[in-house]
Image (tube, rainbow, N blue to C red):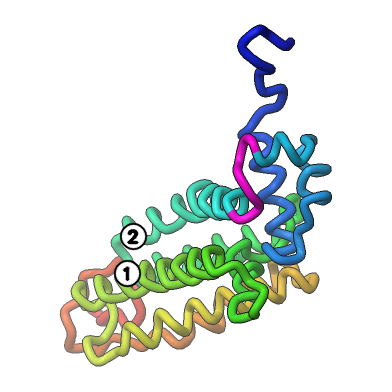
Amino acid sequence: MATERGRPRSFDADQALDAALRVFWRQGFMKASLSELTAEMGINKPSLYAAFGDKERLYLAALSRYAERRLSGLAARMLANPDGREAVWEFLRALAALFADPQLPGGCFIVTGAADCGTSAMSPGVEQALRQALQGNEGLLRQRLAQAQADAQLPAAADATALAAFFIATVAGMSVMARNGAGLPKLEQVVEAAMAVWPPVPLHSEQHGGPGAAGAAVT
């Protein structure tokens, strides 16, 4: 109800943001129209501007929400798993399940958005945020691979930077496949093929990993 101090917000901002996230997840930043956003959010344009600012700020809020609610837990589990190979394997499998979930828009929010990066009409602020998100995920993988090397679960000669880039490319490929109808079994096959590049640890190296570590010494 209206009061002397002004009309209170008549919608749930969290629910509206989740609705906007779904639109951006399906369409990316550039293809998502304000009319589609407001229809999905159940609000009008003045309410959108009042609550979230412009389209760019709404997108950035949705990106932050996606990272917090969909990715942060997966990343934390990967970093906490003491077995390096198993940690990366489970991370990729969890992403495959996320991308192929029929209850979600499909693919990766970040990868879908990043497809527009480099175009002249793309918002510089959005492009920078998407690039940082991709680089951040690659950095997390690089960090976990470096830890695997420190724990003798990955050969010291292995190129952790190149491996992290390869796994991120795998993630991007799975996102595109999922958006084009590939189901979870297909994506899991991709994960298994990707993990086959994990180089075995020489048998004379001291092993600290669990049973999932590649190339564990036979005793």
In the picture, residue 200 is in which quadrant? bottom left
Q: Nearer the viewer, residue 10 or 133?
A: 10
Residue 89 sits above or below residue 66 on the image: below
**The C terminus lies in quadrant:** bottom left
Residue 52 included in the magenta stretch of the image: yes
Q: Amino acid at mark 2?
A: Leu
In magenta, the rendered stretch is 50-56
Quarter assignment of residue 127: bottom right
For residue 93, the mark is none
In percent of width and height, residue 128 lies at 49, 69
State whether residue 189 appears in this view. Answer: no
> Mark 1 belongs to which amino acid?
Arg
The residue pinned by badge 2 equals 79
x then y, percent, for residue 149: 24, 78
Does dot 2 land on a helix, a strand or a loop? helix
Q: Earlier in the sequence, mark 2 or mark 1?
A: 2
Closest to the observer, 118 or 131: 118
Q: Badges 2 and 1: C-beta atoms under 8 Å apart?
A: yes
Give the x, y percent position of residue 192: 55, 78
Circle 1 sits in a helix, a strand or a loop, which is it?
A: helix
How many marks on residues? Answer: 2
Judging depth in this view, the residue of 111 and 159 nearest the camera is 111
Residue visible at 60% across and 76% down? Answer: 117
Q: Is residue 217 left or right of residue 9?
A: left
